[in-house]
Amino acid sequence: MPTKNESKTSTRLSKAEKERIDQVLTLLDEHYSTNLICYLDHENAWQLLVATILSAQCTDARVNIVTKDLFRKYQSIEDFAKADVKELEKDIHSTGFYRNKAKNIIECAKRLVEVYHGEVPREIEDLTSLAGVGRKTANVIRGNIYKEPSIVVDTHVKRISNKLGFTKQDDPEKIEEDLMRVLPKEHWILYNIQIIAHGRSICAARSPQCDECFLNALCKDYQTKRKKLKIINEKIDIKEISNSKKAKENSIGKKVK
Ligand code: SF4
């Protein structure tokens, strides 16, 4: 039975690998939202940009608490460009790394006002020329604001993509390249949204619930661990059989004497 993602993945993959990836994507579609939702609250592009800068090493929930008041106080990107750095540091203190973040937000806002007429640019080169904006933040903007196919490699995408065997890389840029090679373009934005949901609900970093996971039959990490466990169990079984055989032979030997 063909899945709806079938034949859309990279042609360089083996047929079996393409099928496996198609099945993973189909299951993700079945279990999680297929709507392009964003976990960071925002009403426009510059708010999402500021929220994403704040989200480094911080939970989305915490960022949403902070930006609720922040965007009431700073109502335009010009307000951020004119902000007092010490005051902004206090405003965003609870998101962590507040000194760097405050400095970057002000620098970023100044460049947006001076070079881009207050608009958040669309192209990756322009976005990454802004202070505090790397590929991850740039891809958040491209995907959420401009609906450009893009893959955001955050902590969940990095960890779970490795577990699923979609990449073996540690570097986010290389992971992004690998994912762009193996995932169908129309699933790029959604993949991030669904993998975050999976990381929060089932495949947590510290205690993934692999036995309950709907992806376990397709997950390379889980299958590798199962195979290893099976080999260990088989070795234990063989040892136990040979021990009981020896014990039996010894007891027969004693009876004969
Ligand atoms: S089987 Fe385990 S490691 Fe693999 S995706 Fe599911 S929870 Fe994560």
Image (cartoon, rainbow, N blue to C red):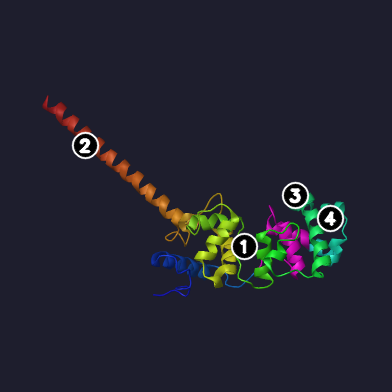
| C-alpha distance separating marks 4 and 1 | 27 Å
In the image as oriented, which residue stretches furthest toward the top? Answer: 257
Q: Give the Cα distance between marks 3 and 4.
A: 12 Å
Q: Which residues are magenta?
A: 38-67
N-term-proximal mark, 4 vs 2: 4
Give the structural element (helix, strand or loop) at label 3: loop
Pair 4/2: label in front: 4
Q: Residues within 10 Å of mark 1 (few under 14, many from 20)?
A: many
The CA distance from mark 2 to mark 1 is 58 Å
Kind of element beneath mark 1 = loop
Is 56 magenta? The answer is yes
Labels 2 & 1 near each other (Cβ < 8 A): no
Q: CA distance from mark 3 to mark 1?
A: 21 Å
The residue carrying mark 4 is 88
Q: Which residue is mark 3?
A: 97
Find disc 2 in the rendering and name its residue.
245
Determine the main secondary structure of the stretch shown in magenta: helix
Alpha-carbon distance for marks 3 and 2? 64 Å
Q: Is residue 40 visible?
A: no
Task: Please state which of residues 51 and 182 is positioned toward the viewer in this rendering.
Answer: 182
- The mark lying in front, picked from 3 and 1, is 1
Instruction: Return the residue nearer the eye: 19 or 195.
Output: 19
Position of 89 with respect to 223 (left or right) is: right
The part of the image, by quadrant, that contains residue 239 is: top left
- Callout 4 secondary element: helix
In the image, which is nearer the foreground, mark 4 or mark 1? Answer: 1
Label 3 is placed on what type of residue? Phe
Which is nearer the N-term, disc 3 or disc 4?
4
Residue at which label 1 appears: 152
Are the residues tagged 4 and 2 within 8 Å (C-beta)? no
Q: Position of residue 50 (x, y in %)?
A: 76, 62
Point out which mark residue 102 bears.
none
